[in-house]
Amino acid sequence: MGNFLQGGLPPLPGTGPDIISIVTNMIFAIIWSIVAAIGFAAAIAIGLFVLNRLTPGIDEWAELRRGNLAVGILWSSFVIAVVIVVFVVLNK
């Protein structure tokens, strides 16, 4: 029964929606979306920089242009791993 009232009690009948709290929640959602987008972009940029430093002598962009599938899989898996880490950090 612990999860039953986790979201709080429903509003009383006849009170109607509270417009101020709805607008406040919308503003916070927009701000949080902007913060998350900046965080994800920075984390991916830093992650790809680190991956580039971990693989000296390999020009990943040139390999991708030549159609090297292994480099594409490596980059995509690395980006997915960074996104999972950032998602877990931002949702704490």
Image: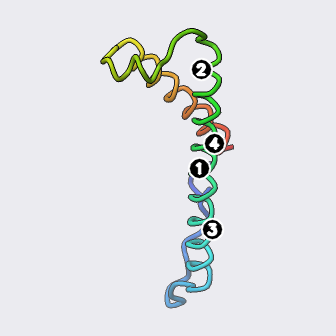
Q: Quadrant of residue 21?
A: bottom right
Q: Under tag 4, what secondary structure?
A: helix
Of marks 4 and 2, which one's residue comes earlier in the chain? 4
Q: Which residue is tagged 1? A: 3
Foreground label between 3 and 2? 2
Q: Is residue 63 left or right of residue 83?
A: left
Instruction: Give the distance between the C-alpha atoms of the residues marked 3 and 1, in whole angstroms.
Output: 25 Å
Q: Which residue is tagged 3? A: 28
User: Where residue 4 appears, x then y in whole percent?
Assistant: 56, 54
Of marks 3 and 1, which one's residue comes earlier in the chain? 1
Above or below: residue 55 compared with residue 89: above
Residue projecting furthest to the top: 57
Instruction: Give the distance between the C-alpha atoms of the residues marked 3 and 4, in whole angstroms.
Output: 21 Å
Q: Amino acid at mark 3?
A: Phe
Instruction: Give the distance between the C-alpha atoms of the residues marked 3 and 2, in whole angstroms.
Output: 34 Å
Quarter of the image with the C terminus in it: top right
Above or below: residue 1 compared with residue 80: below
Q: Which mark is residue 51?
A: 2
Q: Under tag 3, what secondary structure?
A: helix
User: Foreground: 24 or 57?
Assistant: 57
Q: Residues within 10 Å of mark 3 (few under 14, many from 20)?
A: few
Q: Are marks 3 and 4 in contact (CB under 8 Å)?
A: no
User: Where residue 65 appears, x then y in whole percent?
Assistant: 34, 23
Above or below: residue 79 compared with residue 69: below
Instruction: Give the distance between the C-alpha atoms of the residues marked 1 and 4, in whole angstroms.
Output: 36 Å
Q: Which residue is tagged 4? A: 42
Residue projecting furthest to the left: 67
